[in-house]
Amino acid sequence: MTEFENIVIGKSSIPSLILTVVLMIAVPVVFFLYWRRKHKEKTKIRWLIAGAAGFLVSARMLELGVHYFCIIADNPVSRFINGNTAAYVLYGTAMAGVFEECGRHIILKYFMKKDRTRENAVLYGIGHGGIEILAVLLPAMITYLAVAVVFSSGNTADALRALKITEENAAAALPSVRAAAAFDYGMMAMNVIERLLTMFCHIGLTVIVYYGVVKVRKGCLPAAVLLHMLMDTSPAMYQRGLLPLWAVEVWDAVWVFAIVFLAVKLYRKT
């Protein structure tokens, strides 16, 4: 496994990863504490929990179940999607939009009938976006940090043994090790900015869906699905190597602005 012998952990990798982990935790905590303090009398913690549960069920259970058949398993459908960039981008964005927004709609309409206030809708969005950070992205960053710490010792053999990297799984582990080694303050900034944008996106989309539920506006759900798809288009293109990371952030910022602008108008109308 000579590829691993040439990997050098950058001087800023470990401190930038530590700071990224701290900031990843801070983002949802600060959002929650700020909104809860400002609207304590109008918000209920169960709405935060409902938002977190909604993401886990819709995105991490149901959506991943479809991904297993359409992306991970070896069959004609997965081979077509993985082999066709346009199909991959369309599939990925559509699944994220449909599952997360329909999940939001179902929970807000049928399960969260009590204390249905606009302030609680925002709290739901904080729960949705917050659990995505804590359950999906934070573990990945902690893994990168562990890899960087282990490889920083300079003993490749001991590092491979500690991380249980063998000849059989070396090809799968190599990209993660390289990513941990190359992580720096620029990547930290990109990750934190992306999470901030995504938090505002989830809050805005929740308000849009919430408005459709309380005002019986059927166009709000498809609008949220479409906006979610547009927001996720650039990350999907980045995964296919079509866009640099900075372009993803610019694209996301544009659509987050549009989503928040619409959400603020609807928030004031409720």
Image: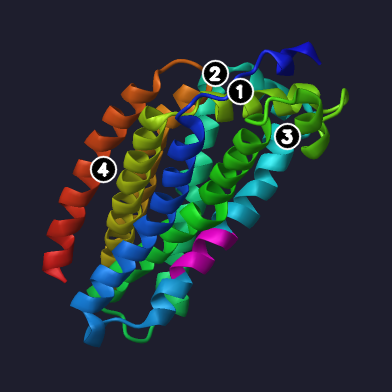
Residues at marks 3 and 1, CA–CA distance in whole angstroms: 23 Å
Nearer the observer, 89 or 247: 247
Which residue is under mark 3? 72
Q: Nearer the viewer, residue 5 or 44?
A: 5
- Answer whether labels 3 and 1 touch (C-beta < 8 Å): no
What amino acid type should be assigned to the residue bearing mark 3?
Ile
Q: Position of residue 37 (x, y in %)?
A: 23, 77
Q: Quadrant of residue 226?
A: top left
Mark 4 crowdedness (10 Å alpha carbons): few <14, some 14-19, many ≥20: many
Against 245, residue 161 (above or below) is below
Q: What residue did someone put label 4 on? A: 256
Which label's residue is closer to the chain start, 3 or 1? 3
The CA distance from mark 1 to mark 2 is 25 Å
Between the C-alphas of marks 4 and 3, the distance is: 30 Å
Residue under numbered circle 1: 178
Span highlighted in magenta in the image: 51-57
